[in-house]
Amino acid sequence: MPITIKGDQEFEEINSVEYKTQRINLNENVYGSFAEIGAGQETVRNFFQTGDPSGTIAKTLSAYDKDYSDAIYGVEPDGRYVTLSRLRSMLSLETRLLEERISREKHPDKMFFSYANTVATIDFAKKYKGHGWLGIRFQSKPKEEYSEIILHIQFHENSAIHQQLTLGILGVNLIYGAYYHYDDSKILLKQLYDNISLDQIEIDTINFTGPLFENIDNRLMSLQLVKNGMTEAIMFGSDGNNILPASLLYKKNILTLRGSFRPVTKVNISMYEKSLELFLNEKKVDKDNTVVIFEITLSNLKTEGEIDEKDFMARADLLCSLGQTVMISNFQEYYKVVEYFSQHTKERMGLTMGIKTLIDIFDEKYYRHLSGGILEAFGKLFFKNLKIYLYPSKDPETGKITTSENLELHPRVIELYQFFKKNGRIVDIADYDPEIIDIHAKKVLQMIVEGESGWENMLPETATAIIKEKKLFRQ
């Protein structure tokens, strides 16, 4: 993109807020509006404090009063204001007004943008830290179709003033990234944290749309959020678009199946279907208020210490094709997953797993970093009425079937295991299919990589078709 700078100023590549606002302000063709509600106008303030903002700022607006905001942007069906729907209403209206009120004939080289945020900062009692939506709709060339970047944030600072200041810096970084890094989404993502630390603010959802981002897969952008430590977990739906975890999980019953899904096999689907049947038979578990999550940990995505993005996309494609909602997390221990879910719901939770995973959960070595050891971890894991749905395993040599009744654990944890078993927290999936219990993902993957036949019948038909069509998991 050609950049027109007033004068002969030369800029060195630095990341300060002043540098970024100055570079944008001195770009004669970048021109737009700022609409910020709920947390002050800290983003636009940064542009005003840098020289020559008149060529950049068409309008600035803070419709703080709810009735006034409704009069401008309309009433949201759910009556809420800090929502994606409200942000999109703001971006749409402000973009339309720019096009209507600024003459293209008079300003043929202008590249318009609309920046907006709707944010709730920390409450007076400091019970809720606050969160918000922010986004930019912009052009990289005059008159081109608009592209858009939208993200959701969680505040971690304990002062409303500090949160507002941080939001202002993030807004500057977003606008700067849109114009100067739109051609490299990974750099754009990383520079959002210029002059901000990871413990100040969390970006847990981001979506890129429009002609500039046609080749970007938002699932891959989600992976970058977790990989870069910007959030602990992200989610995306079967359509491939990123989902705000808080919106999906709010007051829901949650059933989670963790795995590598490399590839997803008939056993995985059987575990999902059979455990869901058991879960829906639990008291107070309503099907319409239940979500199922296929979770992959960051460590499960690493091969030889690095994350293979091609491999990740292969797994994502398979799970999405099966209509599943996927979570990528940085949670090694299961109790951390439960803690994360419990931030959003107090309803029932279920974990689906195999024998080997359950044995690992009862291994004390994983909890040495906790002062209360395994007892502390299990106090968090078996939150309220959480249950584990256990899929049996078969010994390939002896043919022995292992269930919760005959699995072998270290003597030190036997009584702890029996306590949860007797209290109904560990439930066997008895209605399993003996014809598929011998299927193992590692063996299937090896067969695919080596070009062997016979793996096709070990996977769901849809997964088999996609692997063949896209030649997934091939070296």
Image (cartoon, helix red, strand yellow):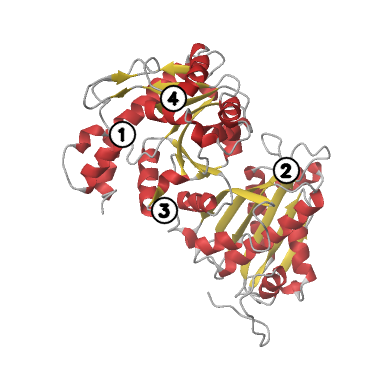
Numbered label attached to residue 125: none
Q: What residue sits right under mark 2 in the picture?
A: 130
* Front one among 318 and 307: 307
Q: Nearer the viewer, mark 4 or mark 1?
A: 4
Q: Nearer the viewer, mark 3 or mark 4?
A: 4
Instruction: Look at the numbered disc 1 and give the secondary structure of its residue.
Output: loop
Kind of residue at badge 3: Gly
Q: What residue sits right under mark 1 in the picture?
A: 265
| 437 lies above or below 424 | below
- Rounded to the nearest angstrom, the CA distance separating label 4 from label 1 is 30 Å
> Left of 238 or right of it: where is 473?
left
Q: Position of residue 13 (x, y in %)?
A: 61, 76
Numbered label attached to residue 305: 3
- Rounded to the nearest angstrom, the CA distance separating label 2 from label 3 is 35 Å
| 26 lies above or below 289 | below
Q: Nearer the viewer, mark 2 or mark 4?
A: 4
The tag earlier along the polypeptide, 1 or 2, is 2
* Front one among 465 and 422: 422
Q: How many residues crowd mark 4 within 10 Å: few (<14), some (14–19), many (20+)?
A: few
Kind of residue at badge 1: Thr
Kindly indicate whether the residue at mark 4 contacts the one at mark 2 (C-beta within 8 angstroms): no
- Rounded to the nearest angstrom, the CA distance separating label 3 from label 4 is 30 Å
> Left of 50 or right of it: where is 175?
left
Kindly indicate whether the residue at mark 1 contacts the one at mark 4 (C-beta within 8 angstroms): no
The tag earlier along the polypeptide, 1 or 3, is 1
Numbered label attached to residue 410: 4
The tag earlier along the polypeptide, 4 or 1, is 1
Q: Nearer the viewer, mark 2 or mark 3?
A: 3
Kind of residue at badge 2: Gly
Q: Position of residue 179 (x, y in %)?
A: 58, 68
